[in-house]
Amino acid sequence: MSNKKILYLVADDRYFCSHRLPLALKAQQQGYQISVATPAKGDHLEIQKAGLDFYPIPFDRGGLNPLRELKTLGQIFKLYRQLRPDIVHLVALKPVLYGTLVALFAGVPRIIAAVAGLGAIFSQKHWLQKPVKLTLRWLLRWSRVRVIVQNPEDAEVIQSLDPRVQVHLILGAGVDTSVFFPVSEPAEPVTVVHVSRLLWTKGVGEFVAAARLLKEQGHHLHFRLVGEPDLENPDAIPLSVLQGWNREGIVEWLGYQKDVPKLYQQSHIAVMASYYREGIPKSLIEAAACGKPIITCDMPGCRIIVKDGVNGYLVPPKDSEALAAKILDLALNSDRRLAFGKASRDFVMQHFNQDLVCQQTLELYPANS
């Protein structure tokens, strides 16, 4: 019996470790030979430590330099020829575009195109939207390609490209519920936490504005901002702005934190005010697994996690006053926080258990024989 080879092509090594490493290890347990290609930014050491073959490949996620992009395409083709994978699993828009194009020409038998949210290009009017749609229409219609999306709105957009596209709805990346679990609420003051990449479109500015408004009104709440600037993204919040917020005392900016379960367990309320075109934000799945009430925007992906008035609140995008009102509502009502938090945990156990999500994905791979 020959074990099939899988190559995961992802634009960021940290993202692979947080979102796809458990899936790769499950596939390895089933006998697949696993290789991973991402930029080597430091977290690739964790991939190697897990016993997976690692290949560094340059990906400038926001880059448009033609020569650099052609070089990346060439390196992907060279890697495919070297490894001869039976399956390539591509995650996020640029790897899907580049990886699918090269895989079709290289004769890769099965292509898994995981569109983990349609991102900024589809969130607003963008000059790249039309060419990207036309390219996706051609790439994704082939019978070798299986497309994974995380929410029904994205499924509708992708399916509308061409009726031949084989779209599969799998809710998020899943979460290890033995690592992310509820504990008793911490002592007051009520702590509100926002965990995300630090982009304006993630609603960080609205979170800070809501914090400022509530503090000006005399409410003694503690606001924590967790994450680091995504320097490859033109939407990144400048370091000087983050440091200014910290000095002002509106929010406590903690930077990147590895122990996310502890952060949620030390908090009372989780917020993510994103108006970005999310797949399903993993940070919200993790918050729900920790039994937190959640406030997020009424946007694709985000509203999958939060059922308004059941496990949290949905607020209009870019509305810091509405966000502040809902934060205050939960801050003043511990019984509601606990009821919402229990509903969050129950929802994750039913729909986002990591083993369930991994199994749904593995079913799209050809049998390992």
Image: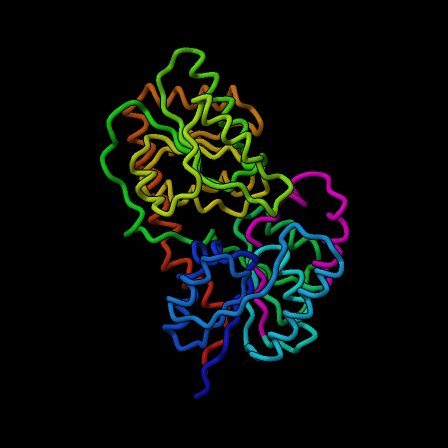
Estimate the x, y position of residue 333 in percent, counting from the top left. Answer: 31, 21
> Is 185 left or right of 4, judged from the image as shown?
left
Judge whether 219 appears above or below 93 on screen: above
> Is 326 left or right of 346, judged from the image as shown?
right
**Residue at image point 74% right, 48% down:** 128
- Magenta stretch holds residue 39: no
Nearest to the observer: residue 133 or residue 40: 40
Judge whether 104 appears above or below 353 on screen: below
Judge whether 326 appears above or below 285 on screen: above
Estimate the x, y position of residue 26 in percent, counting from the top left. Answer: 38, 67
Estimate the x, y position of residue 129 in percent, counting from the top left. Answer: 73, 47
> Is 202 left or right of 308, judged from the image as shown?
right
Estimate the x, y position of residue 270 in percent, counting from the top left. Answer: 39, 34
Colouring convention used in this rendered image of the protein: rainbow
Nearest to the observer: residue 272 or residue 36: 36
Q: Tell me the quarter of the picture where residue 11 sits.
A: bottom right
Q: Is residue 331 visible?
A: yes
**Residue at image point 68% right, 38% down:** 124
Q: Is residue 310 visible?
A: no
Nearest to the observer: residue 212 or residue 157: 212
Q: Residue furthest bottom?
A: 1
**Residue at image point 54% right, 59% down:** 168
The segment highlighted magenta reads 110-138
Image quarter (top left, top right, bottom left or bottom right) of the C terminus? bottom left
**Residue at image point 41% right, 29% down:** 252
Nearest to the observer: residue 302 or residue 12: 12
- Magenta stretch holds residue 137: yes
